[in-house]
Image (cartoon, rainbow, N blue to C red):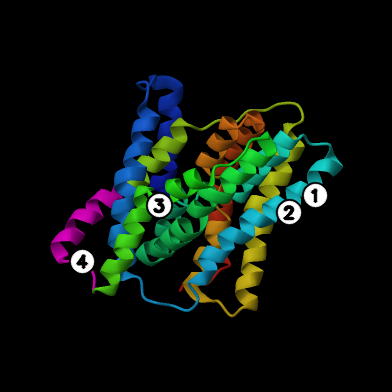
Amino acid sequence: MSALLLLFLCLVLGILVRRFAQPPAGIVHGLNWWVLNIALPALVLELVPRLKPDATLWFPVAAMWVVFFGAWLLFAWLGPRLGWSRGRTGALVLVCGLGNTSFMGYPLLQALHGDAGLTLAVVADQLGCFPLLASVGVVVACLYAGRAADPRRIVRRIVTFPAFVALVVAIVAGLLGGWPAVLDGVFKPLGETMTPLALFSVGLQFRLQAGQGLLGATAWGLGWKLLLAPALCWALGVATGVGGLVLTAGVLQAAMAPMVSAAILADEYGLDPKLANTVLGAGIVLSLLTVPLMNLGLPSG
């Protein structure tokens, strides 16, 4: 309970600081830089070498693909029938196909299931959600914005991302027997900065815009992201014999709020930014309720 309270307080503190304290310009960029380039790689380097080989580890990764491509199929089918613009359809594919599996997924899985849950959250994020954002996510943004994608730039973006590099190094370290204790003592405190700073940053960026015509699309988007997508992932896991914490981690990561970076990508490509930010803000608030509730019906280990 105290861990969940910490998440909530960090998020609310970010919202209050943005609203009343006039934080310095560039604070969000600085916090995100630390989280993505220092805290997240340190967390990966600490946790991944401890991961025990398991034939079911495909599931948390596959769940991220189910969420993304399911969103693409659903909204590409719904869009013409509901009179949505291509920009609106593209925005929903991005923000409701990609989850906040790091900034919110890591803290929530750790709060609910400790370091074992956090380790599986890293697998889903680094092998599932992040490669999707950096590859197919960019392709979707280009398609719906009428631009051409650059394959070389996409590949370069993936292989040079610090956490992805850390993942490769951590896998090698795990195969060689893990890190010396002195390095574990370095990675752990650096990685622990991620939870408060990530949620504080999310709070600073929180937006919730009400506008004409946004309610229906927002409801469709969050209905998929917070309810239907994790239900499909649960059905996939049960049907294929996945159980225990692996099933729980995959389903909960599928149920996370929309990804902040996906909303930024939609904004960058002009894909209905108001809708993208409305879905993002509402999804963050609702997921703080829906994810813990969903966890009650899933195995704990």
The spot of residue 104 in percent (x, y) is 46, 48
| Residue in the foreground of this view, choosing between 157 and 280 | 157
Tag 1, which secondary structure?
A: helix
The spot of residue 246 in percent (x, y) is 49, 71
The vertical placement of 233 against 204, above or below, is below
Residue at numbered disc 3:
159
The vertical placement of 243 against 142, above or below, is below
Tag 4, which secondary structure?
A: loop
- CA gap, disc 3 to disc 2? 28 Å
Residue at numbered disc 2:
73
* Mark 3 neighbour density, 10 Å: few (under 14) some (14–19) many (20 or more): few
Image disc number at residue 179: 4
The vertical placement of 185 against 248, above or below, is above
**Residue 64 placement: quadrant:** bottom right
Of labels 3 and 1, earlier in sequence is: 1
Total labels: the figure holds 4
Is disc 3 in contact with disc 2, using a CB cutoff of under 8 Å?
no
Q: Which amino acid does label 3 sit on?
A: Val
Residue at numbered disc 1:
77
Magenta residues, start to end: 177-193
Is disc 1 in contact with disc 2, using a CB cutoff of under 8 Å?
yes
Of labels 3 and 2, earlier in sequence is: 2
Q: Which amino acid does label 2 sit on?
A: Leu
Is disc 4 in contact with disc 1, using a CB cutoff of under 8 Å?
no
**Residue 297 placement: quadrant:** bottom right
